[in-house]
Image: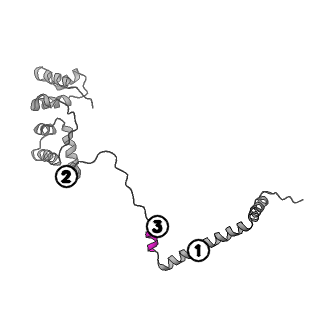
Amino acid sequence: MAKYSEEFKMKLVTEYLYGNLGYKLLAKKYNMPSSTPLSRWVSSYRAQGINGLARRKTNETYSVQFKLDVVQFMLKTGASYMETAVQFDLNNPSLIARWLKVFREQGIEGLKPRSKGRPSMSRKPKKSKKKEEIKLTREAELERENELLRLENAYLKKLRAFRENPNAFHEKHMQKWHSNSKKKDFD
C-alpha cells in the first residue's frame, strides 16, 4: 500500500471539494491505482478536519472494551467501516475490519492484546535419576547393585593382572593384531 504525505492528501481533498472532478478522475490525474483512498480521505476530512488526514505517529493500543464497543456499534447499526471509523475518530477503517473478523472467529478473546515477538524458549525440567531409582522395587535395586559389583570386580581383576605383568597385556593384543594382518600362503 502506498503511503501518501499529509500535504498530498490535503491537496487532493481540497481539489475534490472545490473542483469539478470526481474521485476516479482525480485518482487518474495523480496516477493513483485506486480512488478508494481518496474517498476515505474526503470522509475523514469532513468528519475530523485536518486531523482525519494525519497519520498516527505511534502505534496506539486500544483497550478490549473500546474494540468491543466499535464492533458492537457496527453490528447493531449496520454502519460501514468508514462510518464506524468516523464515529469513533479512527482514521483507519481496515483496523475495524480486522477487529470484526477476529471477533467473529475467536470472540472477545481474539480482541485481547497478545505479547509481541518470539516466545521465549521453555525450559523443560530434566528427569532426575533419583526419582527413577525410588520407583524401583527392592528386588530390582538388589539386582542393579549386584550387576554394579560384578562390573567393579571384573575391572579390579583386570587392573591387578595388568599391574602384575604389563607386558603380557601388550603381547596378547599384539598377537591379535599380527595374526589379523598376516597373510597365510599355502604352497
Quadrant the N terminus occupies = top left
| Quarter of the image where one finds residue 24 | top left
Residue under label 1, please give it: 149
Q: Nearer the viewer, mark 2 or mark 1?
A: 1
Q: Bounds of the magenta span?
A: 124-135
| Quarter of the image where one finds residue 164 | bottom right
User: What colour scheme has been applied to the protein in the rendered image?
Assistant: one colour
CA separation, marks 2 and 3? 45 Å
Sequence-wise first label, 2 or 1: 2
Mark 3: amino acid: Lys
Residue under label 3, please give it: 129
Q: Which residue in the rendered view is the most extreme toward the front?
A: 164
SS state under label 1: helix
Q: Give me the disc on residue 108.
A: 2
Q: Nearer the viewer, mark 2 or mark 3?
A: 3
Mark 1: amino acid: Leu
Where residue 144 sits in the image (x, y, percent)? 54, 74
Of residue 40 and residue 109, the one placed in the foreground of this image is 109
Q: Give me the disc on residue 37.
A: none
Where residue 52 sits in the image (x, y, percent)? 14, 31
SS state under label 3: helix
Q: In the visual, does 132 lie left or right of 35? A: right
Q: Is residue 99 above or below residue 8?
A: below
Where residue 126 sits in the image (x, y, percent)? 42, 61
CA separation, marks 3 and 1? 19 Å
SS state under label 2: helix
